[in-house]
Amino acid sequence: MKSDELFTEAQKYLVGGVGAGGRFHPLLSRPVYFSRGRGSHLWDVDGKRYIDFFTGSGANFLGHDHPAIRKAIQKALDIGIICNGETEYHARLAGLVSEAVPCAEKVRFANSGTEATMGAIRIARSFTKKYKILKFEGHFHGMHDYLWHNCSSGVGEIREDGTITPFPESAGVPEVLADLVVVLPFNDINTFARVVRAGKDELAAVIMEPVCYNQGCIPSDLGFLREVRNLCTEHGIVLIFDEVLSGFRMCRGGGQEYYGVTPDLCTLAKALGGGVPIAAVCGNAEIMSSLNPVGRTVMSGTYSGHLTAVMGAVACQTEIAKPGFYEHINVLADRLYKGITEALQVCGVPGIVQGIGARFGLYLGATEPVTHCRRLPVNREMEIRFIKGCLNRGLYLHDYGHTMHHGFSAQHSVADIDEALNVTEDALRDVKAKC
Ligand SMILES: Cc1ncc(COP(=O)(O)O)c(C=O)c1O
């Protein structure tokens, strides 16, 4: 197979044969080598066609090769590959974001979600003149040293004060940073209230995924979220919603519109640009004024707000704002999640699907809704068999070696969802037969 040949060649020059660690597919023992993406489909170099349920980890929210994004990028190329320069399109994109996202009075661009969360906590630290950041177990905020603690590689010990021992997700993260990170269980308001009251003088920010898609799809409990908002306001702590995945995913205003809870700052990426490398920190004008050139907090870069990405994102945001956009997303979401639930029952496989908007988690082996991120009730053997069954039958699900989120794009059709459901049922029969 050409894929195997490419992998052999790639290993000569690329570490582990991949340009980015997460692209290695552990269930295939190599990456998938794509040759083409169109609409809801991907093709690999061996000619296999897949319905795409990975969608670039959620970035390809408008599917592949969307004509509006393609046209915008073409126009950007005609203008010139302008790096580190402002154009009329930067404020246009910021205006679209501001119109859509409740907290976004002001916007600053970055290239990736990691960069955006790094910027957001820097702003919070400089604004509050405090240094500790509170995060929740299982929530992922990118791979910079400060926040890459307690995501998916294990479970920290619960200490007497209710906090969880922070552990880094990568070698090379300085141990001293663990002193600046407070890790708490998700959706546990009593522990949160106690720890925040005790630590308010040191806590600069609380950062969270309003819907924790990085553990599949675990919603915030609404009462919990409202109380988190109240306590942050009461104690001068900046509340940051990391909406890198939830932004635009179920409605134009993302998790904050969905719950009706407005954070002080939020981070956006992925669906912001529909596949182009762009991210943003947005928020309350007073707090955002900490940023240079108005304030002394620095956040800039050669490629930040690169013109090709900005113009692609303007096109993506213009599509998202069109009437009927979310009706389509919600029709597909309902059909898919009901269909998977039925398939689980028909095949006699225990499991729960949880989805909000265009992304979902499938917890094979679970019998109750999943509400927290500690030791997910997932049967990994079943999960592996299921994903392999889907891949073999042309439904592309990625895997990072643990339970993750899957999803569809705006270019998926009802027919794509039905085809995916047929594959799902067949793959679940494999699971039933062999586990
Ligand atoms: C919630 C969240 N925050 C931050 C990130 C990091 O974004 P990026 O991969 O663009 O650095 C991700 C990536 O999946 C994410 O899901």
Image (spheres, rainbow, N blue to C red):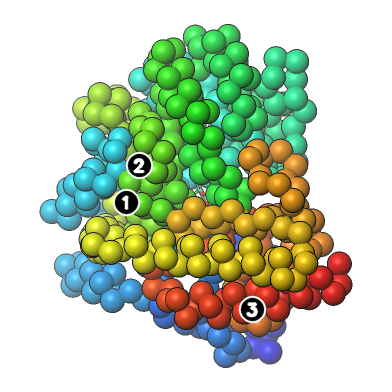
- Mark 2 or 1 closer to N-term? 1
Q: Quadrant of the N terminus?
A: bottom right
SS class, disc 2: helix
Quarter assignment of residue 144 = top right
Disc on res. 423: 3
Estimate the spatial distance between the alpha carbons at disc 3 and disc 1, rounded to whole Å.
Answer: 30 Å
Amino acid type of the residue that numbered disc 3 sits on in the rendered structure: Val
Circle 1 is placed at which residue position?
Answer: 252
Residue at the spot 48% in from the left edge and 23% down from the top edge: 227
Q: Disc 3 or 2, which lies upstream in sequence?
A: 2
The picture places residue 83, in percent across and down from the top left corner, at 27, 56
Name the residue carrying label 2.
Answer: 257
Q: What SS does tag 1 mark?
A: loop
Instruction: Assess whether mark 1 and mark 2 are in contact (beta carbons under 8 angstroms).
Output: yes
Is ligand 1 closer than 8 angstroms to the Cβ of mark 1?
no
Asked if the residue under mark 2 is in contact with the one under mark 3, i.e. CB atoms within 8 Å, the reply is no
